[in-house]
Image: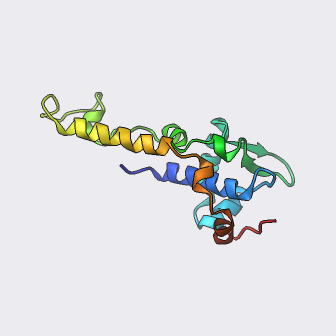
């Protein structure tokens, strides 16, 4: 299983904001600089994270973004489900485009389906708070000064 860059950036954005803390606003440029990734890529990510209720946007001078809920309330599996387009890890998982000749008798797809379910179950067992427990070390790597 491989996550899209979009999901990767979504999770990284949430981690950055979780380390930053709900009382502090961050900018998209700040996050892009911290990860050395494109600001343009992050713009859609942050918009969608806001649409899903994970972050809130404060407009105007001195504005920015921050988490809209506590890190303990943000489930990693839930974020992945909302940011991934599909979980068709093999052709036969998509009934609309499946052309595999052995699909009707294939036992591999059952094993792959179980693996996918286990993968999601592990992600469901973590919250954002669980993946940012080393806030001070992460803040240093991000270049954030923490109070």
Quadrant in which residue 113 is drawn: top left
In this orientation, which residue lies closer to the viewer: 74 or 9? 74
In this orientation, which residue lies closer to the viewer: 117 or 87? 117
Q: Residue at x 27, y 32 (%)?
A: 97
User: On the picture, is 104 further left or further right than 114?
Assistant: left
Residue 47 visible somewhere in the drawing? no
Q: In this view, does 47 lie above or below 133?
A: above
Residue 90 position in % (x across, y down): 27, 41
Q: In this view, does 34 lie above or below 46?
A: below
Q: How many numbered circles does the render carry?
A: 0
Residue 141 visible somewhere in the drawing? yes
Where the C terminus falls, by quadrant?
bottom right
Q: Residue at x 53, y 46 (%)?
A: 126
The figure's colour scheme reads rainbow
Residue 128 position in % (x across, y down): 60, 49
In this orientation, which residue lies closer to the viewer: 16 or 130? 130
The residue most toward the right is 61
Q: Which residue is drawn at 69% across and 67% down?
A: 136
Quadrant in which residue 109 is drawn: top left
In this orientation, which residue lies closer to the viewer: 59 or 68? 68
Residue 32 position in % (x across, y down): 64, 62
Q: Which residue is drawn at 19% across and 40% down?
A: 108
Quadrant in which residue 92 is drawn: top left
User: On the picture, is 72 further left or further right than 120?
Assistant: right
Residue 142 position in % (x across, y down): 66, 68
User: On the picture, is 123 further left or further right than 96?
Assistant: right
């Amino acid at each position: 299983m491989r996550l899209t860059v979009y999901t990767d950036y979504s999770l990284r954005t949430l981690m950055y904001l979780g380390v930053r803390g709900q009382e502090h606003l961050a900018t998209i440029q700040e996050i892009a600089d911290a990860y050395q990734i494109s600001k343009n890529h992050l713009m859609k990510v942050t918009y969608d994270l806001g649409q899903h209720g994970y972050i809130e946007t404060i407009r105007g001078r001195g504005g920015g973004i921050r988490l809209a809920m506590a890190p303990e309330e943000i489930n990693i599996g839930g974020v992945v489900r909302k940011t991934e387009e599909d979980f068709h890890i093999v052709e036969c998982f998509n009934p609309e485009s499946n052309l595999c000749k052995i699909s009707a008798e294939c036992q591999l797809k059952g094993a792959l389906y179980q693996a996918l379910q286990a993968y999601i179950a592990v992600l469901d067992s973590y919250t954002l708070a669980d993946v940012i427990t080393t806030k001070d070390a992460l803040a240093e790597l991000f270049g954030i000064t923490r109070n």
